[in-house]
Image (cartoon, coloured by chain):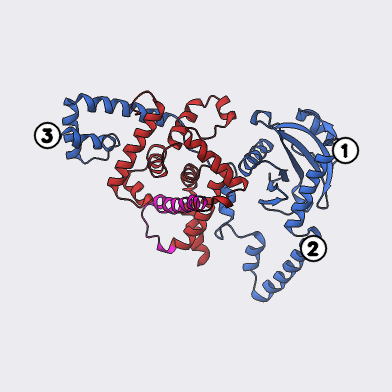
Chain colours: A red, B blue
Amino acid sequence: MDSTRNARYTALVSAELPAAYNLARWLVRDSTEAEDVVQEALVRGLQYFDGYRGGSARSWFLAIVRNVALGALGTKRRHPEVSLDDDASDALMDELAGQAGGIGVDPADVAGGEHEREILRRAIGALPTDQRAVVVLRDIDGLGYREIAEVLGIPIGTVMSRLSRGRDGVAARLNPGGERP
Amino acid sequence: MMSHDQAHPLIDAFLDGELGAVESADFEGHARQCRQCQDLLAARRALLERLRRAPLRYPLPAGSERRLLASLPAAPAPRARRMLSSLPLPAALAASLVLAVGAYWAGHRHGDSRLAAEAFASAHVRSMLAEARVEVLSSDHHTVRPWFTGRLSFAPPVPELAADGYSLVGGRVDYVDHVRCAALVYRAGAHWITVFVAPNDSGWRSGDERTREDGYQVIRASTGTFRMVTVTDMADAETRRFVDRWLAAAAG
């Protein structure tokens, strides 16, 4: 009984792992930490699985990922002194770099002609977390507004305004001479 | 007729097809006559097209789907457990006793994972202190791989990872955690990486895991045919990237 429940759960969430990792990676800005977030979300999801009433499995699981990711970010902010191990300091460096206008660029990627991708990733990465989440879910994952509202636990009107502000922010960073004050 | 102030906040929802039919028609009606909205629409379309064309998604690192799902109780039961559940109760009890004793002996023989991780970290540190970190020096796996022939009972994979930023310094034969193994030494900037390789059935602990020993990362993984243990002082994320590239290259 328990094993069929677990098997159903695995079947349901395994298809969502790429989107889950992508969202976590964009939120926590570190690949190892993103994997840890997905791992924790998988465990929590299994605990909450009995409360899952059908509907979009993606929204349901991504909402858990988002909660875990924001929790991880919150812990780091509240306890900066414990974030001296490599994982956390990498993420912190990424974050600082992001605030300074650029997420750490992987030289191998740039050498591979991924310049455009890095520019866009930096522009999105520099957005505040709430706008970044909406832009990632809409413009990278292609979710509809209703799904995004479910994942983030916010009204659709808020999705619309965050998305507009987020896209404005990306555009302003891509054309610094343009709309930027 | 919709005013500009009403229309402006709807631009994104209009482009995303998220407005109702009536609202959408109202918006279009306004935009046809509003130069400002036309410019904004054009700029936004260009931005969205640019975002669509670039692969911005971060792909799951190689092997991580397996790693993630393996951590769930929902993962396929280990073979021993599946066999047990099909046995009648007394037989299952007897079998689990055998397994427990076996596990004890396996644990006894190889120590717990902490001790084993320590052994790998020490082997790495020892080699860093030695005059020669490697017995065969090379930046080319074509000279390293044949060198192991005759020195080991197996031919270890020797991936060339220069394109990923890791140069192969060379290799040596080592003896770690009761197993005669290949030690491959790579360099990434100021960091040194040792990869210990032995066949799957050599007796090293199975399973992927990551531990830390005196500031060194010790990561275990498997190619299916071989077990590999990576020891380095690189950061976590970078080490994970190295292991993924190494496994992908060894499989390819």
Q: Percent from the top left, x then y, of residue B90?
A: 68, 76
Q: Mark 1 or mark 3, which has the lower sequence index?
A: 3
**Labels 2 and 1 share a subunit:** yes
**Residue A153 position within the rendered picture, expressed as x and y whole percent measured from the top left:** 35, 52
**Pointers 2 and 1 in contact (C-beta within 8 Å):** no
SS for callout 3? loop
Residue under pointer 3: B1
Q: What range is drawn magenta here?
A: A50-77
Crowd tier of the residue under label 3, counting other residues whose Cα lies within 10 Å: few below 14, some 14–19, many 20 or above? few
Magenta-colored segment: predominant secondary structure: helix
Which residue extends farthest left?
Answer: B1
Image quadrant assignment for residue B239: top right
Q: Which residue is mark 2?
A: B108
Q: Secondary structure at mark 1?
A: loop
- Confirm whether circles 1 and 3 share one chain: yes
Q: Which mark is residue B150?
A: 1
> In which quadrant of the rendered image does the N terminus of chain B lie?
top left
Residue at 15% over, 34% down: B3
Amino acid type at mark 2: His
Name the quarter where the C terminus of chain B is drawn: top right
Q: Is residue A154 visible?
A: yes
Q: Nearer the viewer, residue A76 or A119?
A: A76
Specify the amino acid type for callout 3.
Answer: Met
Marks 1 and 3, how far apart in space?
Answer: 86 Å
In-front residue for pair B19/B34: B34
- Residue at the spot 64% in from the left edge and 64% down from the top edge: B81
Residue B106 among those drawn in magenta: no
Chain of the residue under label 2? B
